[in-house]
Amino acid sequence: MAFIEIDAVHKSYGNTPVLRGIDLEVEQHQVVTLIGASGSGKSTLLRCINALEDIDGGEIRVGGEVASGPGTDVDRLRRDVGMVFQHFNLFPHMTVLHNVALAPMRVAGTPRQEAEERARTLLERVGLGAKANSLPDRLSGGQQQRVAIVRALAGGPRALLLDEITSALDPELVAEVLAIVRELAEGGMTMLLATHEMGFAREVSSKVCFLHQGVLLEEGPPEQIFGEPREERTRAFLRRIVEAGRL
Ligand code: ADP
């Protein structure tokens, strides 16, 4: 059984279908990457998996439990599956340490001292131990995104969803964030990520999925998707990426 199972998921905003019958499986310890043009539905799919959006049809299961529709235990789901966003979404009025320790204290009832100790350990692991008492706006974008990753890890999730987490960063800050994702991948973290960093996708992914207008048009190992894509639309997308100098 795959850890994340997505069956025939449909989602519309008003009359606009955004996900049109997505089937996708993420096995434990896999890194699965969603690629596709802007607006193809990558972010919406990730948000549906974390119950930030309701789905209109189909089913999502996480760890064998139904994770969509009424009756979903959203707190438990978000403990099992952490999410990191393009725009960090850190609380600006809280120190870095507080940002990281908050959810374990609030959601899991971890005592403050334990939550803060764990937060410090995680911050040190990503080279940000010295920033624990700073407010987020004193950090660079790359540092803030590293904090956001640590925050997503603080509750001990079984998987991470990463939604274009380097897209808002200055180019020279992308590498420090990708290095952490690479380390997590090497450590066996199960991850589903949307990215425009094709070189990175090629390097870390167990499986790459190409979305086109809300349909998962093609999936396969990175060497196949990037080397010998079967679908003309995948080829056209990758041609545009190459022309833009991004692969
Ligand atoms: P991607 O992540 O691949 O760029 P998105 O999932 O963000 O794609 O968006 C898919 C489509 O859904 C786009 O056409 C977008 O405009 C639309 N969309 C996304 N969020 C909303 C929303 N909250 N309300 C209405 N339309 C939305």
Image (cartoon, helix red, strand yellow):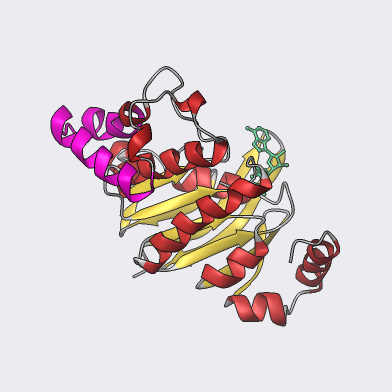
In this rendering, would 14 be left or right of 135? Answer: right
- In the image, 158 versus 245, the foreground residue is 245
Task: Give the answer, above or below, for where 188 lies relative to 158.
Answer: below
Q: Left or right of 198: which side holds 192?
A: left
**Which residue is nearer to you in this view: 242 or 74?**
242
Residue 101 lies in what quarter of the image? top left
Inspect the magenta stretch and tell me whether residue 106 lies in it. Answer: yes
Q: What secondary structure is the stretch in magenta mostly built from?
A: helix
Q: Which quadrant of the rendered structure holds the C terminus?
A: bottom right
Instruction: Give the side of residue 119 with respect to residue 243, left or right.
Output: left
Q: Quadrant of residue 104?
A: top left
Q: Outermost residue toward the top?
A: 93
Quarter of the picture holding the N terminus: bottom left
Rendered location of residue 184, percent (x, y): 39, 60
The region drawn magenta spans 99-127
Looking at this view, is 158 or 75 the one in front?
Answer: 158
Residue sitting farthest toward the front? 130
Q: Position of residue 111 (x, y in %)?
A: 13, 30
Residue depicted at x 63% and y 42%: 169
Magenta run includes residue 71 = no
Residue 111 visible in the current orientation = no
Q: Is any atom of residue 131 visible in this view?
A: yes
| Residue at far right of view | 243
Q: Residue at x 56, y 62 (%)?
A: 33
Relative to 61, is 111 on the left or the right?
Answer: left
Number of marks in the rendered image = 0
Task: Give the image quadrant in which the ligand numbered 1 is located.
Answer: top right
Name which residue lies at 30% across and 40% down. Answer: 73
Picture quadrant of residue 237: bottom right
Foreground residue among 49 and 229: 229
Residue 141 drawn at (x, y percent): 56, 36
Pinpoint residue 84: horizontal percent, then vertical percent.
47, 43
